[in-house]
Amino acid sequence: MKNYTITVNGKTYDVAVEEKVGGVTAPAAPVVAAAPATPPVPEQASPAKKAETVGAIEVKAGAAGKVFKLEAAVGQAVKKGDAVIIIEAMKMEIPIVAPEDGTVANINVAVGDAVEAGAVLATLN
């Protein structure tokens, strides 16, 4: 077994991977306690700026697909129902809309990214 620390979307995980040699599990090495995961270093920002960039309103994917186009940019004001991101699923372009009025705080995806249904694609303030 080999222990690794990986970071996925800002969250840190300790994982153990079993090694196989020729289809047979290799003898286990002595298990050493993994070091605690180091949390990501928070951005240094003033409280006012930090509140602006956090985003309390989540914009979620309604279906699994691929990010086709970003319709809004960080800092842009949007109204309820405005398209924020367009995903492509089953050869169709599906607009992902703002659930309420706000300002785009973060966009968590890029064009070409694969997304799952329910994934948070962006946040609004």
Image (cartoon, rainbow, N blue to C red):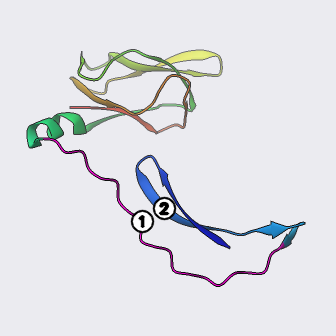
- Residue in view at x 23 percent, y 39 percent: 54
Specify whether 77 is left or right of 28.
left
Quadrant, the C terminus = top left
Magenta-span inclusion, residue 26 = yes
Q: Which residue corresponds to mark 2? A: 13
Please name whichever residue, 51 or 118, is drawn nearer the observer in this view of the structure: 51
Q: Which residue corresponds to mark 1? A: 37
Crowding at dot 1, Cα within 10 Å, few <14 / some 14-19 / many 20+, comes out as few
Q: Image quadrant of residue 15?
A: bottom right
Asked if one can make out residue 78 in the rendered structure from this viewpoint, the answer is no
Q: Are marks 2 and 1 in contact (CB under 8 Å)?
A: yes
Q: Amino acid at mark 1?
A: Ala
Mark 2 vs mark 1, CA separation in Å = 7 Å
The magenta stretch is: 25-45
Specify whether 1 is left or right of 62.
right
Magenta-span inclusion, residue 8 = no
Dot 1 falls on a residue whose secondary structure is loop
- Residue in view at x 47 percent, y 53 percent: 7
Q: Earlier in the sequence, mark 2 or mark 1?
A: 2
Dot 2 falls on a residue whose secondary structure is strand
State the residue lying farthest toward the right: 22
